[in-house]
Image (cartoon, rainbow, N blue to C red):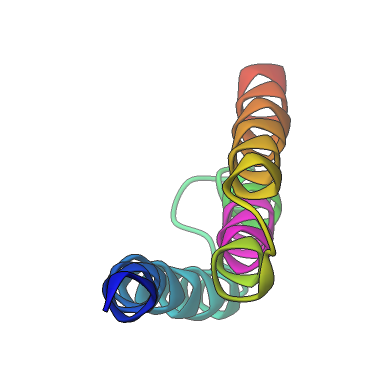
Amino acid sequence: MKEAMWMALRLGAAIPLLAFAGFCGFGFLASWEPEVVPGMNAIFRVLYPVIGMTCLAVVGAILFGRTRKALYATVGLAGIWTAGVVWCF
């Protein structure tokens, strides 16, 4: 019973992250449309893939991670990596 609840919690966390990663994919594709403000699309061409790939890495850790310690480490590293890229812009 405890394992079933843990798996339901994992799926409940993974599904919104997958939806957000899909949104980032569409945002990345939309960033190739003609620019309204010159140079503005370059930010989105970098940030959408970074955030989307971070979401996919966290989903992989949630669904396929063996221990909670590994999950927490992956989520922490993904957050630090994303914050670093966002800070550069």
Image vertical order of residue 52 relative to residue 23, above or below: above
Residue 45 on image: x %, y %: 67, 57
Image vertical order of residue 23 relative to residue 53, above or below: below
Image vertical order of residue 13 relative to residue 67, above or below: below
Residue 4 on image: x %, y %: 32, 81
Q: Residue at x 67, y 26 (%)?
A: 80
For this rendering, which residue is in front, 41 or 53? Answer: 53
Span highlighted in magenta in the image: 48-58
Q: Choose top left, top right, bottom left or bottom right for residue 69.
A: top right
Q: Is residue 36 left or right of residue 67?
A: left
**Residue 26 in sight here:** yes
Residue 57 on image: x %, y %: 68, 62
Q: Is residue 83 magenta?
A: no
Q: Is residue 51 magenta?
A: yes
Q: Choose top left, top right, bottom left or bottom right for residue 8.
A: bottom left
Residue 75 on image: x %, y %: 59, 42
In which quadrant will I find the C terminus? top right
Q: Residue at x 41, y 67 (%)?
A: 17
For this rendering, which residue is in front, 55 or 70? Answer: 70
Q: Residue at x 59, y 58 (%)?
A: 58
In which quadrant will I find the N terminus? bottom left
For this rendering, which residue is in front, 65 or 57? Answer: 65
